[in-house]
Amino acid sequence: MGKKLVVGNWKMNLLREDAKQLSGAMVNMLGACYNECNVVIAPPYTAFEVVRTCIEDSNIELAAQNVFSSTSGAFTGEVSPPMLLDAGCRWVILGHSERRYILGENDEQIRQKLLLSVSSGLKVILCVGETGKQREDAVSDSEDAASRKELLFSPIKAQIESALGSIGEQLIADIVIAYEPVWAIGTGENATSFEIAEIHRCIRELLTRMFPACGNEVKILYGGSVKTVNIAGIMSADEVNGVLVGGESLSAGSFVKIIKSVGG
Ligand code: PGA
C-alpha cells in the first residue's frame, strides 16, 4: 500500500502572492525533508508556477483540479495532460462533485479524461460519492441493512465502474480513489467513522473484484469537511489510506497539523 496520502484542494481560491505565501509557509512548517506521508496540493492553474517554485525542494507534489480529454487542438479554454506535465504537475483530480454537479460533467467525460491522463503519465485522484438525497433514499427505500448498503453503494459503484471500466490492470497503480459524500463537502458535516468504513470497505471489495492482481493496493482517501478536530477519527476508520482536504488546506497551520496527524 505504501505511505498514506494527503491532498489539498485549493479550488478557485488565492491570487499568486497568497498562493506563494501559503505554499512557502507549508514547506517551512512541515520541513523540506518531511516524508512520513505523501503530500499533494492542487492550486488553480494561474498559481502553478509560483507554487511549483516554492515546493521544488520539498517532497510536496503538484496536482491540477481538472484536465481535458484531448492532447491538443481547438478546445478553447481547456488544458491537456501533456500541458500539465510540462507545467511540473504530476497529478490531476477528476470527477470532483463540484465539476459533476455545478459544471455538469458526466461519467463518460470523466472516463475519457481519466484514460488519457493515466496513459499520458499523470496520476489521478478519482472522486466519487453519493448525494444527500441518495443517502436518504437508501434508508427510506430499503427493508433491511443489506439492501440499504447495496442501495447506498450503487451510485458510487456506478461512478467507479464507469471511470475504471476501460483501465487495464497495469495502469491502476497510478489511480487513487477519493470517497467524498457530496453532503459533507464544504458543509462542516463530515461522515462518521462508521459511515466512512462502510463505504471504504465496499470500494475495496469492488476494486479487488475489478482488478484481482492489484485492487488491494489502490489507495482510498476520504474527503468532506476534513479538519484538525476530526482527522484522528477519520483515519481510524477501516480502509482509509489518506484524506482529500478542501477548506482546511487553505490554512498552512491546519493543513500541516492534518498531514502530521496522518503521517503519525
Ligand atoms: P472540504 O472540501 O474539505 O472543504 O469539505 C473537500 C473537497 O471538496 O475535496
Image (cartoon, grey):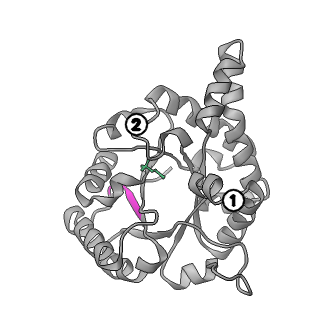
Identity, as a three-letter code, of the amino acid under mark 1: Glu
Q: Position of residue 183 (x, y in %)?
A: 53, 39
Disc 2 secondary structure class = helix
Query: Does the residue tagged 2 have its C-beta within 8 Å of any atom of ligand 1?
Result: no
| Residue 236 x %, y % | 39, 33
Residue 105's label in the rendered image is: 1
- Mark 1 residue element: loop
Tell me the residue that label 2 is attached to.
234
Could you tell which of marks 2 and 1 lies nearer the N-terminus? 1
Q: Nearer the viewer, mark 2 or mark 1?
A: 1
Q: In the displayed structure, does residue 145 sit left or right of residue 239?
A: right
Front residue of 160 and 10 = 10
Inspect the image, locate mark 2, and give the three-letter code of the amino acid beneath it: Ile
Residue 56 seen from this side: no
Q: Residue at x 69, y 59 (%)?
A: 105
Front residue of this view, candidates 64 and 239 = 64
Up-down relation of residue 167 to residue 90 (above or below): above
Where residue 130 sits in the image (x, y, percent)?
Answer: 62, 39
For the record, the magenta segment spans 36-40
Determine whether 191 is above or below 105 in the image: above
Residue drawn at (73%, 77%) of the image: 70
